[in-house]
Image: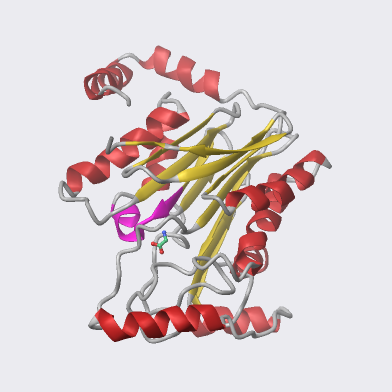
């Protein structure tokens, strides 16, 4: 883990001595032309396979992340994303997603129902509207106007689990620290450009109307093509309170490695919430040079990293040992 004193010393040095800071930023800003894709959790493995094909054929990082995260969105066995996602406490499957390209363009949808691929709606918000985010009925209307079809996203299995939950829940939203969550994906393409995507059905059995970090640019995901990109998974309220993904990218801009930046973003949450037993947070990050990092609060978060022709599932280092 990044030594806190060393981190603070480094930050102080950077604020008083300008030229070394610029040297460090310049060093990380050299773009790699070797494609890399990194994504959260086990469901990142099949998602990475699809993203990698796009990158290998010379496609853009933007196409790679959209095509990649559509895989878990369409898979009913992934019960925290898209079709088959666990509903809110009233039985509605409500979806959040965002996407960001290498030019700083961003699109997002929140509280969207009945549409299997919210990431593709988010991309259209980015490309076809003057806005960044559409929500609820407005997002649905926009999706339908653009050829998306409504579908029932509540599978029999998700409904069965929700009904069992209702019997003993006391109708309280549940903190989800299980090993399945948001898919966040970051990619670097052969042109040396970065993009990111993030999509989820959010906390299982959340309050109706709750929106998490995933559609919030800078919280659930952030991409700055000069520096790097970062994305989050886990308990979104804490990611929002600390603007986690933006924080990770800004730390990289100051010269920290993706690993150090992810560690510091988790430390911010530890500082804010010393009693963090019920909170799980994981970050992934990639620099413009193709260096990657990942870190989480509790052990159990893994991520899929595809580089040099190999797709690997890796356990992230955790703050709690
Ligand atoms: N990170 C997903 C959520 O909190 O909704």
Identified at 37% across, 82% down, the residue is 164
Residue 112 screen position, x and y as percent:
52, 77
Residue at image position (43%, 23%) is: 255
Residue interval drawn in magenta:
232-241
The answer to whether residue 271 is visible is: yes
Quadrant where the C terminus sits is: top left
Q: Position of residue 219 (x, y in %)?
A: 40, 53
Question: How is this picture coloured?
Answer: secondary structure
Q: Quadrant of residue 206?
A: bottom left
213, above or below 302, in the image = below
Residue closest to the far left: 274
**In front: 54, or 194?**
54
Which residue is rendered at x = 38% and y = 86% of the image?
90
Q: Quadrant of residue 304?
A: top right
**Residue drawn at (63%, 48%), measured in percent from left and top?**
45
Query: Where does the N terminus fall, quadrant-wise?
Result: top left
Q: Is residue 79 left or right of residue 265?
A: right
Give x and y (percent) for residue 134: 52, 73
**Left or right, 51 with reference to 13:** right
51 is within the stretch colored magenta:
no
> Image quadrant of ligand 1?
bottom left
């Amino acid at each position: 883990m990044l030594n806190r004193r060393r981190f603070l010393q480094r930050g102080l040095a950077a604020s008083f001595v300008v030229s070394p800071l610029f040297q460090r930023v310049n060093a990380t800003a050299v773009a790699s032309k070797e494609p890399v894709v990194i994504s959260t959790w086990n469901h990142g493995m099949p998602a990475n396979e699809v993203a990698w094909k796009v990158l290998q054929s010379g496609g853009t990082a933007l196409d790679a992340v959209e095509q990649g995260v559509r895989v878990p969105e369409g898979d009913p066995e992934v019960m925290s994303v898209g079709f088959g996602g666990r509903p809110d406490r009233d039985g509605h499957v409500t979806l959040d997603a965002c996407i960001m390209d290498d030019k700083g363009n961003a699109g997002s949808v929140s509280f969207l129902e009945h549409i299997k691929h919210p990431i593709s709606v988010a991309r259209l918000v980015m490309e076809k509207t003057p806005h960044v985010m559409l929500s609820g009925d407005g997002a649905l209307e926009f999706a339908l106007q653009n050829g998306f079809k409504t579908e029932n996203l509540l599978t029999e299995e998700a409904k069965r689990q929700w009904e069992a939950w209702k019997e003993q829940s006391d109708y309280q939203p549940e903190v989800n620290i299980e090993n399945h969550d948001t898919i966040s994906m970051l990619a670097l393409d052969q042109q040396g450009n970065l993009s990111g995507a993030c999509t989820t059905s959010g906390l299982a059995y959340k309050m109706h109307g709750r929106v998490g970090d995933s559609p919030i640019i800078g919280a659930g995901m952030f991409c700055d093509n000069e520096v790097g990109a970062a994305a989050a998974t886990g308990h979104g309220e804490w990611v929002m309170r600390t603007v986690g993904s933006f924080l990770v990218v800004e730390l990289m801009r100051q010269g920290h490695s993706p690993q150090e930046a992810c560690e510091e973003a988790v430390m911010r949450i530890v500082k804010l919430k010393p009693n963090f037993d019920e909170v799980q947070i994981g970050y992934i990050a990639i620099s413009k040079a193709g260096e990657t990092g990942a870190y989480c609060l509790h052990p159990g978060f893994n991520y899929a990293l595809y580089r040099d022709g190999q797709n690997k599932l890796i356990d992230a280092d955790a703050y709690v040992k």
